[in-house]
């Protein structure tokens, strides 16, 4: 039978879990009537990377493995396992998994509160942490990514380590080891956080040794237990296969439950340390030191051709710097709550120094101030405990019981409200709409797994999941060198675009052959084979007739309407001189889905309007002539119609009104003649190079003929 304390703990866990899960259902309630957000009767996921893991789960279930599929990833394996034991579709499982598993965070927080002697601290912290701004964003319904367990495991680790230090009970040695094993299985990059916990325990051991003045260390139970804890942690962190590490951990644990082995503890610790180093356990540390301290000693392969590509990191929001207010909002919901949380955590550490073991998680979260917003989630559990402790401690100053309870209730409500408000307002759409996915599912029916579907990297993983084909770029393969050919093809003339796509695909397939230098980029290999030392000369030569590699597979081009929103970003990757990295003159591009027609003028926003009477466009006070005005629309059978009004042959800007999409597009002649604008917006395609496959107002797919 459970004790009353255990029953109370269980009740708090269940209530906090239900609260966390229910808050995540708000998004589904808000969009339940939007059919475009659903496919096969289920909502689609809200993160691009999720389709990568979903591909792995799909392939595990089907048994047809693609070499690029993440079938060995923990999230894919867990998903496939759940699919086999639950009566739900794969789409349903991947949609709801983030909400379910992220809500497990409430368990270790409530257990930590219990270990502090005030379970209410853990309960309030669980309520806040489970829905905090940043954590919700990365664990909402459909956000199918490793994040939904990435702080659950370290929070459990914090709980087991603090209980191990406090109680010196053997079971917490095992809990700590198993948690590290599972954490590493789930998220291989967990090493840094695990090692930080390890170092803190070493510091604690040093304090214990100092406190005991180096006297009778062998007979000191606290020091002896700390050595055991460090030993079993090192075993779990050894760079060996999961099963072998698990067997070593269990063997070690069972061995030292036999008292006769205790006298060999220090020898065992030394042996484990040697094994840890020999297996490459310190390699991640050395790698980081090389990257951040000893940069001059790093050597990487270089080719005789040195090209300067635009870096993708400059365009990724989650890797960008954030300000203090954003940091505070994402961790606590409001800067006042954030400040009070820090004060509360400092006070908590003063009253319970064992909570200093939360510093690695707090530090990693605070590092997001300079390292990007994605790491903010690690600070959430720690600071949630801080403000919860502050609330409970302040309530102890109140003598009247009902006023005390009212204070706790209102204080908790006040720290929850900013985060609840954010959840209600955070109405993010799925990665793809139904109309887009329907086309991808049709592509699957006419392609083989060796064919390529070309699009921008944002669409790479979803294309692979729904169409089961190859892509050139995706969420994990989008460096400047691989993005360049795709960007260049989308924004170049049709003939050049067709050639660079065929070259890029065939060189991607040839890269593993001995006659291709692997450390060269595809473009560098092309230049080498075609005897060019200057990338500009090579790219200009594509205007001419060249001998292309033998066609080994089909290439399809996937052009969604929504790509218009990111076309300026796409252009960044090909709008520079690769020989020196200097930026070229930008093409003019303006896209507006919000406009107002006032008779003789159409206002497009951002101080831009069209003067219909004078056939000019006014851009921030400057009148510019319009070359032509085009209206596109679709008839009852979905066929594109165009009305073209030629205005000024000497002008450089074209205005396109896409009536079906209710949007305006203004482009210069370079962009007007680009493959994307011609094939998607205008459907003016070279029939010698391209073939229409699927055409809708939202998505257009062409097949490359050459």
Image: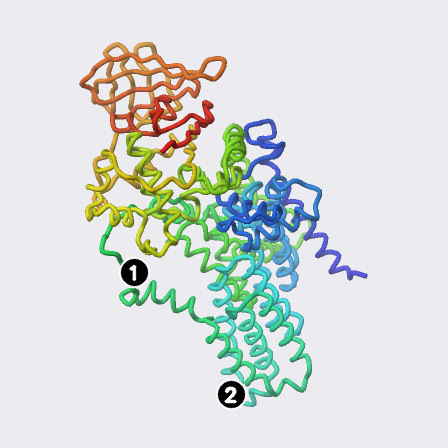
Q: Quadrant of residue 590?
A: top left
Depth check: 495 or 81 in front? 495
Give x and y (percent) for residue 136. 54, 45
Residue 596 is tagged as: none
Q: Mark 1 — residue?
A: 301
Q: Quadrant of residue 603?
A: top left
Q: Specify whether residue 415 is in view.
A: no
Depth check: 481 or 231 in front? 481
- Compared with 444, 53 (above or below) is below
Q: Specify whether residue 592 is in view.
A: yes
Q: Mark 2 or 1, which is nearer the eye?
A: 1
Q: Indicate the colouring scheme.
A: rainbow
Q: Kindly identify the residue that appears in the image at 34 percent across and 37 percent down.
A: 570
**Labels 2 and 1: the sequence-earlier one:** 2
Q: What is the C-alpha distance between the residues marked 2 and 1?
A: 51 Å
Question: Is 658 on the left-hand or right-hand side of 20?
Answer: left
Residue 214 is tagged as: 2
Q: Which residue lies furthest to the right in this view?
A: 1
Pick the quarter of the image with the N terminus.
bottom right
Give x and y (percent) for residue 305. 23, 52
Element at label 2: loop
Q: Pointer 2: residues within 10 angstroms few (<14), some, or many (20+)?
A: few
Q: Kindly identify the residue that appears in the image at 50 percent across and 69 percent down.
A: 239
Q: Pointer 1: residues within 10 angstroms few (<14), some, or many (20+)?
A: few
Pick the quarter of the image with the C terminus.
top left
């Amino acid at each position: 039978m459970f004790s009353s304390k255990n029953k109370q703990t269980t009740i708090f866990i269940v209530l906090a879990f239900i609260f966390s899960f229910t808050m995540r259902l708000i998004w589904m309630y808000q969009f339940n009537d939007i059919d475009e957000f659903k496919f096969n009767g289920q909502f689609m996921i809200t993160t691009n990377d999720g389709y990568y893991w979903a591909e792995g789960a799909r392939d595990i279930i089907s048994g047809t493995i693609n070499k690029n599929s993440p079938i060995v990833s923990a999230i894919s394996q867990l998903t496939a396992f759940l699919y086999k034991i639950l009566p739900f579709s794969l789409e349903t499982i991947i949609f709801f998994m983030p909400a379910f598993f992220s809500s497990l965070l409430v368990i270790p927080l409530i257990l930590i509160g219990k270990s502090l002697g005030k379970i209410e601290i853990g309960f309030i912290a669980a309520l806040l942490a489970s829905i905090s701004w940043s954590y919700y964003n990365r664990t909402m319904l459909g956000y199918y990514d490793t994040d939904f367990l990435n702080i659950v495991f370290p929070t459990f680790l914090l709980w087991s380590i603090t209980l191990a230090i406090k109680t010196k009970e053997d079971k917490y040695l095992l809990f700590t080891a198993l948690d590290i094993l599972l954490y590493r299985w789930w998220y291989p990059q967990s090493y840094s956080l695990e090692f930080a916990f390890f170092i803190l325990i070493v510091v604690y051991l040093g304090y214990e040794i100092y406190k005991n003045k180096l006297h009778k260390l062998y007979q000191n139970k606290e020091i002896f237990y700390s050595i055991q804890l460090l030993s079993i942690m090192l075993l779990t962190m050894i760079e060996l296969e999961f099963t072998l590490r698990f067997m070593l951990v269990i063997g070690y644990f069972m061995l030292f439950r036999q008292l006769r082995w205790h006298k060999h503890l220090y020898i065992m610790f030394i042996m484990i340390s040697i094994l840890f180093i020999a297996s490459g356990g310190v390699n991640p540390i050395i790698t980081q030191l090389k990257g951040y301290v000893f940069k001059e000693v790093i050597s990487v392969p270089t080719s005789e051709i040195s090209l300067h590509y635009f870096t993708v990191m400059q365009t990724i929001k989650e890797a960008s710097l954030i300000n203090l207010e954003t940091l505070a909002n994402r961790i606590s919901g409001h800067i006042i709550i954030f400040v009070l949380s820090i004060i509360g955590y400092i006070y908590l550490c003063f009253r319970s120094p064992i909570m200093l073991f939360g510093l690695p998680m707090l530090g990693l979260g605070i590092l997001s101030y300079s390292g990007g917003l994605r790491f903010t989630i690690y600070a959430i559990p720690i600071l949630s405990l801080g403000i919860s402790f502050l609330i409970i401690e302040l309530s102890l100053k109140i003598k009247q019981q009902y006023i005390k309870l009212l204070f706790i209730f209102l204080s908790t409500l006040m720290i929850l409200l900013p985060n609840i408000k954010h959840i209600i307002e955070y109405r993010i759409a799925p990665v793809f709409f139904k109309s887009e996915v329907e086309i991808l599912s049709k592509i699957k029916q006419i392609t083989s797994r060796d064919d390529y579907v070309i699009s921008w990297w944002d669409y790479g993983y979803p294309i692979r999941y729904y169409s089961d084909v190859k892509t050139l770029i995706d969420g994990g393969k989008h460096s400047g060198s691989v993005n360049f050919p795709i960007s260049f093809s989308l924004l170049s003339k049709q003939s050049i675009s067709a050639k660079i796509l065929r070259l890029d695909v065939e060189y991607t397939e040839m890269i593993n052959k001995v006659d291709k230098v692997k450390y060269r980029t595809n473009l560098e290999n092309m230049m080498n084979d075609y005897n060019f030392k200057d990338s500009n000369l090579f790219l200009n030569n594509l205007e001419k007739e060249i001998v292309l590699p033998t066609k080994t597979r089909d290439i399809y081009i996937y052009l969604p309407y929504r790509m218009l929103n990111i076309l300026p970003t796409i252009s960044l990757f090909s709008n520079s001189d690769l020989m020196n990295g200097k930026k070229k003159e930008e093409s003019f591009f303006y896209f507006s889905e919000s406009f107002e027609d006032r008779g003789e003028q159409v206002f497009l926003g951002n101080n831009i309007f069209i003067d219909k009477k004078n056939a000019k466009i006014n851009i921030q006070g400057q009148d510019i002539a319009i070359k032509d005005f085009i209206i596109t629309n679709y008839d009852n059978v979905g066929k594109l119609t165009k009305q073209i009004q030629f205005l000024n042959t000497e002008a450089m800007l074209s205005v396109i009104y896409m009536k079906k999409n209710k949007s305006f597009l203004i482009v210069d002649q370079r962009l007007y003649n680009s493959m994307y604008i011609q094939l998607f917006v205008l459907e003016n395609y070279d029939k010698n190079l391209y073939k229409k496959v699927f055409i809708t107002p939202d998505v257009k797919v062409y097949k490359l003929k050459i």
